[in-house]
Amino acid sequence: MIIHFHKKPSKREIESIENALTSVEKDTPYALVHLNEYSNFRLFDASHSTYVPPTGLKVSLSSHQALLLLDGRRRGVERRKTGVPRILDVRMDKRSTLEFERFPELVKQISDFSYINWRGFNAVSVPITLNYSKLIAKMVIDIGLENWNQVVAEGKLRDKSWFL
């Protein structure tokens, strides 16, 4: 099981995950993956006139940390955004029970998730696992916590494609 966090998971969150997995099935390997979309790292391509590296560029920093560029230049497509492309700092928490040798697969999966957008035809520059969580949090704020259960109970979201 792969669990994406937008922040470093707390001890209490880890314990909750372990308790939930233990109650369902014993010895389920899991990876806790921190996806920091506000990284201080930047990547540049000095061989290109724009200095923007290609989308999908991955820089491994260790066996459990990598930088992933999801907002770079694409072959045959002009990049319309201005400024420095955002970097996704991906870290697999050391408390994960999944083998660290599988980390490159997880980074590839995160890259693939950035191309999924059920709300339109264009890829977004963050993985769907972060994007849809943000959208749901925004809906809860807009609707109000006291009204959220009613919205869910009435089935208003039943025909929507959500990825969590």
Image (spheres, grey):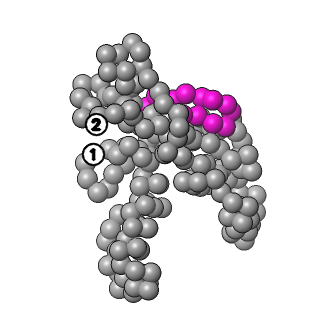
Where does the image place residue 84, in percent across and percent down from the top left?
38, 32
Left or right: 73, with 70 as reference point: left
Where does the image place residue 162, in percent across and percent down from the top left?
39, 63
Q: Which residues are magenta?
A: 56-67
- Residue 78 magenta: no
Residue at the location (44% across, 23% down)? 44
For label 2, the SS is loop
Where does the image place residue 8, in percent across and percent down from the top left?
63, 53
Q: Residues within 10 Å of mark 2 (few under 14, many from 20)?
A: few
- Residue 60 magenta: yes
Position of residue 138 relative to residue 52, above or below, is below
Give the amino acid type for the residue marked by disc 1 in the picture. Answer: Asn
Q: Residues within 10 Å of mark 1 (few under 14, many from 20)?
A: few
Give the residue pinned by disc 2. Answer: 81
Q: Nearer the viewer, mark 1 or mark 2?
A: 2
Q: Quadrant of residue 85?
A: top left
For label 1, the SS is loop
Q: Earlier in the sequence, mark 1 or mark 2?
A: 2
Residue at the location (41% across, 15% down)? 46
User: Which residue is at the front of the view, 81 or 19?
Assistant: 81
Give the residue pinned by disc 1. Answer: 122
Position of residue 117 relative to residue 72, above or below, is below
Outermost top residue? 47
Where does the image place residue 60, in percent across and percent down from the top left?
60, 29
Question: Can residue 46 be seen in this snapshot?
Answer: yes
